[in-house]
Image: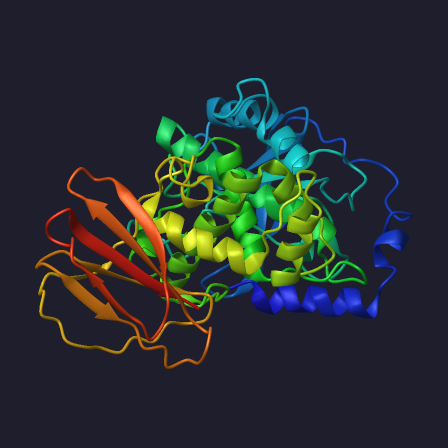
């Protein structure tokens, strides 16, 4: 929903390639806010798709942040206790490490934030985001907007991000954790902009990877991975797609799983080098894999092939690349064929996607996959589960008849899938 104004930022920076160097010379002093400082900040109204001014007051100051709260919700939806809890988590402690806050964790993981306002503290504005929420339905949990990084209309000319206080209840543990997970997420976006602002040598990263990295920031800080139910029921979809409306929740789920899989496999170093890569998309992934301190021969095609297997198997004992250490990553929901006499069918697999077919009944399974996409366009694997739940994985060749005489006797189901 911020895309229109984000494009204006990109256009501005392309037309003013030296903007950031010149801007550093303009603001020479920090904000130096004190508790009680009143200030109105520009924010975005997602219902009218326009900017408006939010009267607020600085309610607390941390080592790495100023916390402003919209005046209209102070001591109703947000209290001093809530603000102090936010500062504690931002500066000092996360579920992942009681001695390291979100600020330090994100900086060590992704890199340095920008600094257009000559003040090392980040401004956190807590407000009731105008997102149309009225007691039910969707809402905007928080956002970072690059318009605040340049001197143009509706810019705050500051490192600022926004946290929603409605419906979030900061007085509950779950409510606070949700807000702080959003904090880790949005702070990554701010850091990311420092390396991909659209100027020369800093190309805009594709949305899928930018969002995936913010979703990994949540996990690195010890918060749960974004809901995986959406991906488990929609895995046959173009990997890098980013949609609007309710479907975007499925894209978040897919991005969270893929980028966190890469983090699980290659560690924090992968996230750092991916953010700071001067490439985008697949080229950035491959560059990052090449530059890891522990060498790997894997490239993007191999990572998604292993990822598809991990999503069906989730067993690092069989192969470290075929599972997760991250909690709450459930196996996908395959298309189940309980009818042993299934004759034939046609499936279209989208680019960078996968489909899973499970056979659970009958005996002496015989099956063949005809690859209409062309030679070597599709890859097929089979996972065989015995009656004790043990699994074996094997590669299949297209246009080849396979007969599993042990199906229904030694093995209770076959989990067969193909990916492009």
Residue 40 in sight:
no
The structure residue drawn at horizontal position 39% and vertical position 57%, both measured from the top left corner, is 249
Vertical arrangement, residue 170 with respect to residue 276, above or below:
above
Query: Of 186 and 137, which appears nearest the observer?
Result: 186
Q: Quadrant of residue 186?
A: top right
Q: Quadrant of residue 343?
A: bottom left
Count of number-bearing discs? 0
Residue 270 in sight:
yes
The structure residue drawn at horizontal position 28% and vertical position 44%, both measured from the top left corner, is 391
Which color mode does the image show? rainbow
Quarter of the image with the C terminus is: bottom left
Query: Of 69 and 400, which appears nearest the observer?
Result: 400
Lateral position of residue 213 relative to residue 118, left or right: left
Residue 115: where, in percent of width, then height?
77, 43
Lateral position of residue 114 relative to residue 402, left or right: right
Residue 75: where, in percent of width, then height?
45, 30
Residue 239: where, in percent of width, then height?
47, 63
Q: Quadrant of residue 52?
A: bottom right
Query: Of 334 and 403, which appears nearest the observer?
Result: 403
The structure residue drawn at horizontal position 68% and vertical position 68%, both measured from the top left corner, is 8
Residue 83: where, in percent of width, then height?
52, 27
Vertical arrangement, residue 271 with respect to residue 413, above or below:
above
């Amino acid at each position: 929903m911020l895309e229109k104004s984000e494009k204006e930022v990109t256009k501005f920076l392309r037309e003013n390639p030296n903007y950031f160097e010149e801007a550093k010379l303009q603001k020479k002093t920090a904000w130096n806010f004190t508790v009680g400082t009143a200030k109105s900040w520009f924010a975005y109204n997602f219902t009218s798709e326009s900017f408006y001014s939010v009267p607020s007051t600085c309610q607390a100051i941390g080592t790495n942040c100023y916390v402003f709260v919209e005046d209209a919700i102070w001591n109703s939806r947000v209290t001093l206790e809530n603000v102090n809890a936010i500062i504690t988590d931002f500066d000092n402690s996360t579920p992942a490490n009681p001695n390291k806050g979100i600020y330090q964790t994100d900086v060590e993981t992704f890199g340095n934030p920008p600094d257009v306002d000559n003040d090392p503290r980040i401004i956190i504005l807590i407000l009731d985001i105008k997102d149309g929420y009225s007691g039910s339905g969707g809402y905007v949990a928080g956002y970072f907007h690059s318009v605040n990084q340049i001197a143009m209309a509706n810019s705050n000319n500051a490192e600022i991000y926004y946290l929603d206080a409605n419906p979030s209840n900061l007085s509950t543990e779950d409510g606070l954790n949700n807000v702080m997970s959003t904090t880790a997420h949005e702070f990554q976006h701010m850091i990311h902009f420092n390396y991909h602002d659209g100027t020369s040598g800093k190309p805009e990263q594709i949305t899928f990877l930018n969002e995936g990295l913010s979703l990994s920031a949540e996990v690195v800080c010890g918060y749960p991975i974004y809901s995986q139910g959406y991906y488990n029921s929609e895995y046959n979809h173009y990997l890098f797609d980013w949609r609007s409306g309710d479907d975007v929740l499925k894209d978040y789920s897919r991005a969270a799983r893929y980028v966190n899989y890469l983090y699980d496999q290659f560690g924090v170093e992968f996230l750092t080098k991916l953010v700071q890569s001067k490439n985008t998309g697949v080229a950035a992934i491959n560059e990052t894999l090449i530059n890891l301190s522990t060498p790997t021969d894997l490239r993007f095609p191999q990572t998604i092939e292993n990822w598809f297997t991990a999503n069906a198997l989730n067993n690092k004992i069989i192969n470290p690349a075929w599972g997760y250490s991250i909690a709450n990553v459930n196996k996908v929901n395959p298309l189940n064929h309980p009818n042993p006499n299934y004759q034939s069918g046609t499936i279209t697999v989208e680019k960078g996607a996968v489909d899973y077919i499970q056979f659970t009944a009958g005996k002496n399974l015989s099956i063949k996959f005809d690859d209409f996409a062309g030679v070597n366009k599709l890859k097929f694997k089979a996972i065989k589960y015995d009656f004790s739940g043990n699994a074996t994985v094997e590669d299949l060749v297209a246009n080849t008849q396979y007969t599993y005489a042990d199906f229904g006797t030694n093995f209770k189901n076959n989990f067969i899938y193909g990916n492009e």
